[in-house]
Image (cartoon, rainbow, N blue to C red):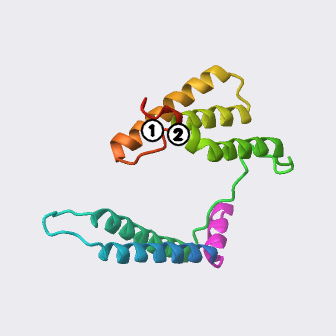
Amino acid sequence: MTETSHETTAAATEPVRIDRAQFGLAGFLALLGGYTLYDASTLEVGFADPVGPRVFPYVIGSVLLLLAVLLVIATLRGSRPEADDGEDVDLDTPADWVTVGKLVGVLVFTIATITVLGWAISGALLFAGAAWALGSTTLVRDVLVGIVMSVASWYGFYVGLGIPLSPGLLDGIL
């Protein structure tokens, strides 16, 4: 018997190791899918709309249930997730609390000023501040990109979705 065939035979006789945590994830997916289907069935829909708002939640709920079943099958067959090699993350390096503090400060500033300044200005400052906290040195570009993104998202919400965001200081201009 060759060494390769001996290894194959030995591997075939090993008991299948089951990762029981995957059953928990499958159960969570099944609960979420079942609730989504139930919630979709309680939507009030007029008879004039043939597709209606139920289609999307029915599809999502069904896919979640299907994924739960497939995960159970894969787990019973012995499929296990591969361990993460950590990519380029050094687990021995401590967290950069200065950067986290800067980001928290930028978020708190945005929350505190959004009603006064409005989304267009606060959003631009949020983007520029987050870029600064993460190490960007091109302040003018960051502010310009933030202005474009925040004004575009303001119009996207207001015009596209019909959801008014606070215009703040720019009330009557936007």
Q: Are marks 1 and 2 in contact (CB under 8 Å)?
A: yes
Q: Nearer the viewer, residue 24 or 150?
A: 150
Which residue is pictured at 56% across the width and 23% down the height?
144
Residue type at mark 2 is Trp
Q: At 63% across and 75% down in the image, what residue appears?
A: 21
In this rendered view, identify the residue nearer to me: 121 or 168.
168
Which residue is drawn at the image coordinates 65% and 46% (left, top)?
Answer: 112
Numbered circle sitting on residue 154: 1
Is residue 77 inside the magenta stretch?
Answer: no
Q: Is residue 171 above or below residue 162?
A: above
Q: Residue at x 62, y 37 (%)?
A: 126
Type of amino acid at the residue the image marks with label 1: Trp
Residue, far left = 48
- Residue 170 percent coordinates (x, y): 49, 32
**In this view of the protein, can residue 19 be seen by the observer?**
no
Instruction: Please provide the residue range marked out in magenta.
Output: 1-18
Of the 4 image quadrants, the one containing the N terminus is: bottom right
Residue placed under numbered mark 2 in the picture: 119
